[in-house]
Amino acid sequence: MQASGKRAIGNRVSTVLGRRLGGELQRLRVAAGKTQREAAEVLSATQTKVVKMESGWVPMRDPDIRALCELYGMVDEGALTGLLGLAKTDRDRRKVKGWWNDTPTPATQAEYIAMEDAAIRIRQWQVALIPGLFQTAEYTRALAVASMSGDDLDWIENTVAARARRQQRLYAEDPLRIHAVVWEGALRQVVGGPLVMGRQVAHLCHLAERTNVQIQVLPFRVGAYPGTGGPFNILSFGEDEAVDVVHMDTPRSTIWVEDAGESAEFSKVFDHLMAVSLSPHDSVRFMESIAKEVQQ
């Protein structure tokens, strides 16, 4: 696990995507029984460069990735395509100054937004709150007012505007695909008052009609359930789940799970949550009933 999104030494930057890619190449190298010195020789480079590549400190060129995969005996074209796509996304993230860098956003939040912007699919488990990409402006504003910075009107409105900007990806020509499992408690916690909360839950029902959005509700009656360790997001940057990373926020830090084995465990938990939750169709009917109850 890593407790930060982006690290810098001098003018070099280690990103979540870079570390994820480097970790995958390191795994392939070790499985093939190759040394960093052998990897350096096939690249006509120094061993130091291989160390930096595997640590995510430098962007990777496609020819280098192909050469290393050939050395390691990795012949799966689909997996190779996934690694090349991840490398391109990482290179783009390093050189492009996203809109989030111009907003008064904490560094860890900015890194998550950058990752979210690069992802093609997100699977999200949410316990206490409505997922950010699904929040109405009123709901977001009510949360901001309730926070420690609630007396800063500029901060509140910047938060609302940034959330709305992120939500544009749901409606893009090639939209972000998101599958969220939400605990019933998040739907019944009356944030902003009955009217605001009723509109928020109704908004979820409308979003669920979109082909790129899937929402399931985990009702109270299920009892004990997996995922009690807290909410998490699984971000996918290719169709191959081998390049997934997991994001979690804690009261003191942001955690990125970049190891393939560990991220796969989160996928298993999410699959279990899906299995014990209401179906997408039944979830909409359930949310419609909650929206009516909240506003009574």
Image (spheres, rainbow, N blue to C red):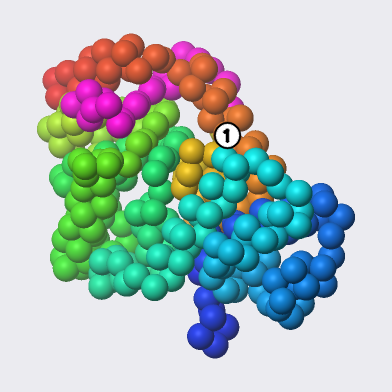
The quarter in which the C terminus is drawn is top left
Q: Secondary structure at mark 1?
A: helix
Magenta run includes residue 175: no
Residue under label 1, please give it. 267
Place of residue 2 in the rendered image (x, y in percent of width and height, measured from the top left): 61, 60
User: Residue at horizontal 53%, vertical 54%?
Assistant: 84
Question: Does residue 19 appear anywhere in the picture?
Answer: no
Which stretch did the figure color magenta?
Answer: 205-226
Q: Say which quarter of the image contains residue 264.
A: top right
Residue extending farthest bottom: 10
Magenta run includes residue 225: yes
Q: Say which quarter of the image contains residue 1.
A: bottom right
User: Residue at horizontal 31%, vertical 30%?
Assistant: 213
Q: Is residue 249 left or right of residue 80?
A: left
Q: Nearer the viewer, residue 13 or 59?
A: 59
Q: Is residue 116 above or below residue 61?
A: above
Q: Is residue 200 above or below residue 118?
A: above
* Residue kind at label 1, given as amino acid type: Ser
Q: Is residue 225 left or right of residue 23?
A: left
